[in-house]
Image (spheres, coloured by chain):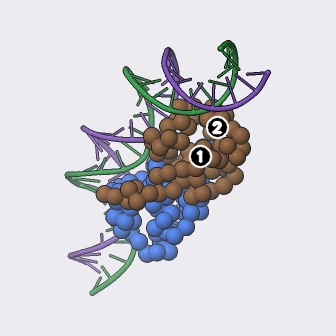
Chain colours: A blue, B brown, C green, D purple
Amino acid sequence: MKNTLKVERAKKNLTQADLAKLIMVSRQTINAIESGKYVPSSVLALKIAHIFETSVNEIFELEESDWAK
Amino acid sequence: MKNTLKVERAKKNLTQADLAKLIMVSRQTINAIESGKYVPSSVLALKIAHIFETSVNEIFELEESDWAK
DNA sequence: ACCAAATGTAAACTTCACTTTACATATTAG
DNA sequence: CTAATATGTAAAGTGAAGTTTACATTTGGT
């Protein structure tokens, strides 16, 4: 799964730490999500979309590999 | 977080087992998500939305409590 | 009422999301 | 240049997502 977190953050001029605080997770969590190290829960994804005033689908996108067995 | 999985399944006439097979998780996982027992990963949420030809935000909705510290 | 399919639930287990602490490297401002 | 801010990364721990097996209950069709 890929995401456009970095771009969305840039648009709103937010640091990873800023975003982390807004959605109440650690800065490392944002960093890890952003760099594809792990997949956020859907609650986190919804919160992130909410902060950026958009939808989950606009920010997160499935890749072929996500459908692999 | 609440969801409209049951309704979406009904629209498409899918059983929990059907949906489970389509997105490649166990039937119990669908049951647990549907009954709010746990929060799916965003990959699962995206797959589910894909199956129902809609968006994650249409199916899953944050509740006040999700923002509580 | 009866049978089959669908759903609910439980226990034990594995994996990974997320935390905290800590430090190293980039980036930007003055 | 240098000091502060932002980002990358790592290790050890905790809790919850998701698995399998198994059984009990509900629902629907005939």
Q: Determine the residue positioned at 69% across, 52% down.
A: B53
> To which residue does mark 1 refer?
B5
Amino acid bearing label 1: Leu
Q: Which residue is mark 2?
A: B19
Please tell me in which quadrant of the rendered image residue B38 appears: top left
**What's the chain of the residue with tag 2?**
B
Q: Give the residue type that dot 2 points to.
A: Leu
Q: CA distance from mark 2 to mark 1?
A: 10 Å
* Residue A67 percent location from the top left of the image: 63, 41
Question: B41 or A4, which lies in front?
Answer: B41
Horizontal side, residue C3 vs residue A39: left or right: right
The answer to which quarter of the image holds residue B6 is top right
- Residue A48: image location, x then y, percent: 46, 62
Q: Closer to the camera, A46 or A37?
A: A46
Residue drawn at point x = 31 percent, y = 57 percent: B69
Disc nearest the viewer among 2 and 1: 1
Count the marks. 2
D15 up-or-down from B59: above or below: above
Compare residues B47 and C1 and report the one nearer the observer: C1
On residue B44, the disc is: none
Residue B42: image x %, image y %? 52, 49
Q: Is residue C27 left or right of residue B9?
A: left
Tell which of A14 and C11 is nearer to you. C11
Dividing the picture into quadrants, the one containing residue B31 is top right
Sequence-earlier tag: 2 or 1? 1
Q: Chain of mark 1?
A: B
Q: Is residue A11 visible?
A: yes
Task: Answer with left or right where residue C12 lies relative to residue C1.
Answer: left
Residue depicted at 45% across the width and 60% down the height: A47
What residue appears at the point 67 percent right and 43 percent down from the top-left corner?
Answer: B10
Evaluate if marks 2 and 1 touch, with contact meaning CB atoms under 8 Å apart: yes
